[in-house]
Image: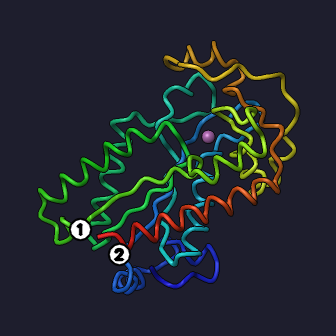
Amino acid sequence: MSSPFENSQSARLDLRTWPEVEEYLQSCKGIILPIGSTEQHGPTGAIGTDAFTAEAVALEVGRRTGVLVAPTQAFGMAEHHLGFPGTMSLQPSTLMLLMHDIVLSLATHGFERIFVVNGHGGNIATIKAAFSEAYSSVLKRRLPVANKVRCKLANWFLASEVFKEARNLYGDKEGKHATPSEIAVTLHLHPLLLNKQHPLPPAAPAGPIHGPEDFRRRHPDGRMGSEPYLAKPEDGEILLDIAASSLSKDLSNFLDAS
Ligand code: NI
């Protein structure tokens, strides 16, 4: 692991030049890749919630560990949210190709440890499938790093310390979608979103869903069992810190592992 960066912007790959990236690779083979989703988050939550949160966690992990952060992938697999305007989704097959191609590009340049910080549950299955595809491709193409490439999926909202704090703050009003914990992080990042917050009637409990129409029928305002009006910006700051601590530990173990 490298020395910490002076601030989170210093962790951004897209603010580096290629000679800087080449030099970085001499001492660190790791990179962080944030991915979110562009999808409805209930009547008071921002469409960009999952991308904002993944990016913020990724940049803070990058700052603390000295590992570069790739540009955020803002679109994810959100087919079941397409009943609500503003949602933009990649089909699983599209997302799989996209993740595969990104991993392959990075592996071509010598990155060996790809740490994906994910902000959206709907991406999990597809990202894991993409890793399998990418492992197969690097071997077939006989890339110099073929046997060394490892990918790891880190879902910040499922980290046990984050989960515990969310339960502690909101109990069973955390719910499953448009949760107060993720909304709190967005309020910390974008105070303008505070204007949109107001109390809501109890949300329909989380349950099985079968596509966008069924989602909207069961969850007419887009929430699944959550009470996002409980979210406060100061909770978001705490949750972000807890998520960054937890994922920084995971990342250092990942970089050290053979
Ligand atoms: Ni979300």
Q: Does residue 3 lie above or below 254 as drawn?
A: below
Disc 1 versus disc 2: distance between alpha carbons? 10 Å
Would you name the residue on which mark 2 appears? 29
Residue 40 lies in quadrant = top right
Determine crowd level at label 2: few under 14, some 14-19, many 20+ residues with C-alpha closer than 10 A: many
- Of residues 22 and 136, which is closer to you in this image? 136
The residue under the point 38% across, 63% down is 114
Query: Mark 2 belongs to which amino acid?
Result: Lys
- Quarter containing the C terminus: bottom left
Q: Position of residue 88 (x, y in %)?
A: 53, 36
Q: Secondary structure at mark 1?
A: loop
The residue under the point 16% across, 67% down is 143
Residue 19 lies in quadrant = bottom left
- Quarter containing the N terminus: bottom left
- The quadrant of the rendered image in which ligand 1 is seen is top right
Would you name the residue on which mark 1 appears? 148
Q: Does residue 103 lie above or below 97 as drawn?
A: below
The residue under the point 58% across, 78% down is 10
The residue under the point 31% across, 50% down is 131
Q: Position of residue 62 (x, y in %)?
A: 54, 71
Are dots 1 and 2 in contact, CB under 8 Å?
A: yes
User: Is 31 on the left or on the right of 239, as rendered?
Assistant: left
